[in-house]
Image (tube, rainbow, N blue to C red):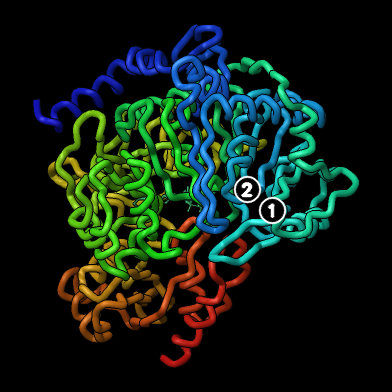
Amino acid sequence: MSNIQKYKEFYKQSMENRDDFWQEQAKMIDWDTPFDSVLEYNNPPFAKWFHGGTLNLCQNAVDRHLADRGDQNAIVWVSTEEDKEVNITFAQLHKQVNEAAAVYKSLGVEKGDRILIYMPMIPQAVVAMLACVRIGAIHSVVFGGFAAHALASRIDDATPKVVVTADAGLRGGKTIAYQPLLDASYQQITITPPKVLLVNRGLAEGALGEGKYDWDEQMAKCAGQIVDPVMVESSHPSYILYTSGTTGTPKGVQRDTGGHAVAMRASMKHIYDLQPGETMFTGSDIGWVVGHSYIVYAPLLTGATTILYEGLPIRPDPGIWWSLIEKFKVSVMFTAPTAIRVLKKTGTDLINKYDLTSLRTLFLAGEPLDSETHRWISDALPGNVVDNYWQTETGWPILTNFAGIGLMENKFGSPTMPAYGFDVMLVDESTAEPVAANEKGSLMIKAPLPPGCMTTIWGDDKRFVETYFSRFGKEMYATFDYALRDEDGYYFIMGRDDDVINVAGHRLGTREIEEVLCKHSSVVEVAAVGVKDELKGQEVVAFVVSSDQTEAASESDLKALVSREIGAIARPKNIYMVSGLPKTRSGKVLRRAIRSMAEGEDPGDLPTIDDASVLESIIATIKKG
Ligand code: ATP
Ligand code: MG
């Protein structure tokens, strides 16, 4: 059987024999009480997977590996900021999560309480997460690096009893003190101030006072204590995670326990193909869903080693990640396309310097992977490169290629095909009718969503239904992305449906235009946006970042390229050459901000922006014309 046939058979099983399919997957997880039914779905769109079963996520991620893998590394922490490397075996991790769980209990945390984790990429952050689910508490990790306001709104929404934090994070050699940010957020919150548990790295002043406790001291007090994992219902929330906020106010995505555990473990087998005992390196942050799923839960549930990396991908030089792959014999790597584009700017020499034969597959997700970057990195690496399309809401890939089933042929620019369990539909946005091959439609998922997906918006079932299930009724989950499917069944993401550009009645996806501009050899990155035009409604404006290695393209060449490939209707009115694009800290282009600036307006308050200095340079470029 060819890989594509194998995939189709597997996918069909998940659709036609859904319960048996997931029953089988659930065997990869330890249950304390077996579930009564695979799915309870009597209140659409709320799905309860593995109803009646009880389990503990921390027990599955840590305790159950002790017998066979106690001495194997669970976490390898590499900090190029502190120039440190620390190995933590499963046995050591077990000891630490027990002590941390005891600390939480001493601070009065009980099952169902929230713990907010505002931390840099240090091992204590992972310990803090695992200890939380060990006692049935619910974590909400907030990206360490969000400023006071973003933090305050998340504290108010999650109402945690405890905030776990550190004195400081490090980024590109700079110390970012967290305490002033936390203190400022406490000035803004409206709830009773949560207690603070502070990891002191000795980097910045972290004054302990009323309600603030030192992590090391508390851990020492609880040294050697064992806290039995609290078995929770499968539908018990394991965590809340806010979406990136690329399009608006972040939504508090709530994830269950049983469905989450099964989905994570199954994805390692079928999609990522990582075996117990092997090593995975996910270059992301625990503050994002990719970090939750593929730095922490999926590798640990699998009994694999995970690399936790603090630092930039280009420091001390852009070869650092490849050096880690060689050194730790990484089998599977995961990161965002933006990181690869940064490396692409500097060429392949630093890739060729290292022995990367251990790396079977590199997975990329979070933003469109343009076909040129996909081709470039595929040529540069000995292994395969797979584009993954998913969302904070789903927790694991909606569209992907499947290393565990057998990779199908890649089509550059396509995240391949729907993952098992996802009943993906492409529909016309006004009629809800399925669209034909090669036609753009709204990407929807027929409910119920598979295990591991969000179960609701934290504290707001109504917003959950209204946000995701109001377009075409409770049967259809909206991703808010456009896609098309070609005649071979491959999917192509065409952009978000709220940033479609409407030129004289023609609806253009931002992605189509960007994809074409990326074909020019000098273009590394591009954002296309629609700006108001009196005559045509909107006009296309593009912002282009060029490579260090080639001469920049001329504006007229690039305009001609778009006319030729898409049509005169898409020809950008203006093309601005800029040094960088405004992005969220998770690497997503903030198109709304760009659009505002292109229309001569203020980009507004951007709490999630990574580097605000690019805004000024863009505004200056626009002014110059
Ligand atoms: P918010 O929903 O708060 O505006 P966000 O959508 O940026 O934020 P995430 O859940 O982090 O938050 O991002 C998911 C989105 O990222 C997808 O809906 C899609 O638009 C984009 N995306 C992710 N992976 C890919 C991919 N492989 N190709 C194209 N787009 C992708
Ligand atoms: Mg989103």
In the picture shown, does residue 41 fall above or below 597? Answer: above
Q: Secondary structure at mark 2?
A: loop
In the picture shown, does residue 325 fall above or below 184? Answer: above
**Residue hosting label 2:** 142
Q: Where is residue 316 shown, x and y percent of the image?
A: 44, 64
Three-letter residue code for mark 1? Leu
- Observer-nearest of 37 and 318: 318
Q: CA distance from mark 1 to mark 2?
A: 7 Å
Q: Residue furthest right?
A: 210
Q: Secondary structure at mark 1?
A: helix
**Where residue 94 is drawn, which disc sits there?**
none
Q: Residue at x 45, y 66 (%)?
A: 591
**Residue hosting label 1:** 151
Q: Where is residue 413 shown, x and y percent of the image?
A: 23, 54
> In the rendered structure, are the residues bearing label 1 and label 2 in contact, judged by CB atoms less than 8 Å apart?
yes
Q: Residues within 10 Å of mark 2 (few under 14, many from 20)?
A: many
Q: Where is residue 146 shown, x and y percent of the image?
A: 63, 57
Q: Quadrant of the N terminus?
A: top left
Q: Residue at x 19, y 45 (%)?
A: 436
- Observer-nearest of 133 and 232: 133
Three-letter residue code for mark 2? Val
Q: Residue at x 60, y 31 (%)?
A: 130
In the picture shown, does residue 111 fall above or below 217? Answer: above
Q: Where is residue 550 shown, x and y percent of the image?
A: 24, 79
Q: Quadrant of residue 396?
A: top left
**First along the sequence among labels 1 and 2:** 2
Asked if disc 1 is less than 8 Å from ligand 1, the answer is no
Q: Residue at x 60, y 42 (%)?
A: 252
- Observer-nearest of 298 and 452: 298
Q: Quadrant of residue 192?
A: top right
Q: Quadrant of the C terminus?
A: bottom left
Q: Is residue 90 visible?
A: yes
